[in-house]
Structures are given as C-alpha cells and as structure tokens.
Image (spheres, rainbow, N blue to C red):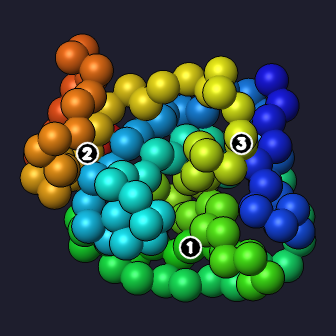
Amino acid sequence: MVRVARCHCGALSATTTGEPRKISMCHCRDCQRRTGSLFSIAAFFARDDVVTAGGNAVFERPSASGHPVAFHFCPACGTSLWWEARRLPELIGIAVGAFADPDFPMPEQAVWAVDRHEWLALPPDMPLHERNPVRNG
C-alpha cells in the first residue's frame, strides 16, 4: 500500500509504503498546542518505508516523556507533517490528517490521557494510557 501525506499548500510530502507500525492518539499538551486541537494522531512507519520531498524547516523540542522530537514542517504554510522521536529512532511519525484519507485505520491506543479533555469521548475498546506506555525491548 502506498500513501501520500501532504502539507496544506502541497509543497511538502511524505510517501509511505506498507502499513504503519502503530497509530497513536496523543493528548499531551504539547500536541494540543502543535495541532491547535485536543489531540494529535500519528501513524508511525519504519524509516525505510518513508520518502519525503520538498523543503522543510525543523523545530526540535523535548517531548512529554522527556526525549527530544524533531518536527518537520512546511516553511510556506506551516503544516507539521512528520516528526522523528529520539525515543523511536527506527520510526517516523506522520500526521494522519495529512493523508486526507477517511479510510485510514483508527488509532490503536490513546496516550497522555492525563491531559485529555474529559468531555472527549473515545471508542470504548481503545486502550487509554495515562502517559506513554513503556516500550518492550
């Protein structure tokens, strides 16, 4: 499966092959500020399964879990399209909304629920983690 995520103006893209390794909904306050929404949804793909195109700017900050994350965004329209978390060096996170695909799979988990807006209803079977779950291995 090939999917293409694009920024709002179309100057920046990320083309993926295969299926995401994981899809997460993050409620941390940093993601709320970055998206201007109540959460962020990221699809994490193997680094070798992502090809990016177009000029991008980078903003790096510590994540809620304490590890740096580099956000790649379009310098023309400001869309934050993909990010690289040092905690997950083998993966690239891509903003699911940038795929503009209503058939994209739903997140398999919600993280940083400690910052979740209480009135936001989630699917009853979605695992909800107060913070980020500990990685195995």
Above/below status of 121 relative to 129: above
Give the mark, 2 or 3, whose residue is nearer the N terminus: 3
Residue 61: which quarter of the image?
Answer: bottom left
The x and y percentages for residue 132 are 23, 49
Residue that label 3 marks: 99
The x and y percentages for residue 130 are 12, 46
Above/below status of 3 relative to 66: above
Question: Which residue corresponds to the image point at 52% horizontal and 59% vertical from the top-left?
Answer: 89
Question: Which residue corresponds to the image point at 24% horizontal and 15% vertical from the top-left?
Answer: 125
Give the mark, 2 or 1, whose residue is nearer the N terminus: 1
| Image side of residue 27 versus residue 59, left or right | left
Between disc 2 and disc 3, the foreground one is 3
Q: Do the residues labelled 2 and 3 touch (CB within 8 Å)?
A: no
Residue that label 2 marks: 111
Q: Name the amino acid type tagged 2.
A: Val
| Image side of residue 135 versus residue 114, left or right | right
Give the mark, 3 or 1, whose residue is nearer the N terminus: 1
Q: Name the amino acid type tagged 3.
A: Phe
| Image side of residue 126 versus residue 95, left or right | left
Q: Is mark 2 on a helix, strand or loop?
A: strand
Residue that label 1 marks: 71
**Mark 1 packing: few (<14 Cα in 10 Å), some, or many (20+)?**
many
The N terminus lies in which quarter of the figure? top right
**Mark 3 packing: few (<14 Cα in 10 Å), some, or many (20+)?**
some
Question: Which residue corresponds to the image point at 61% horizontal and 68% vertical from the top-left?
Answer: 80
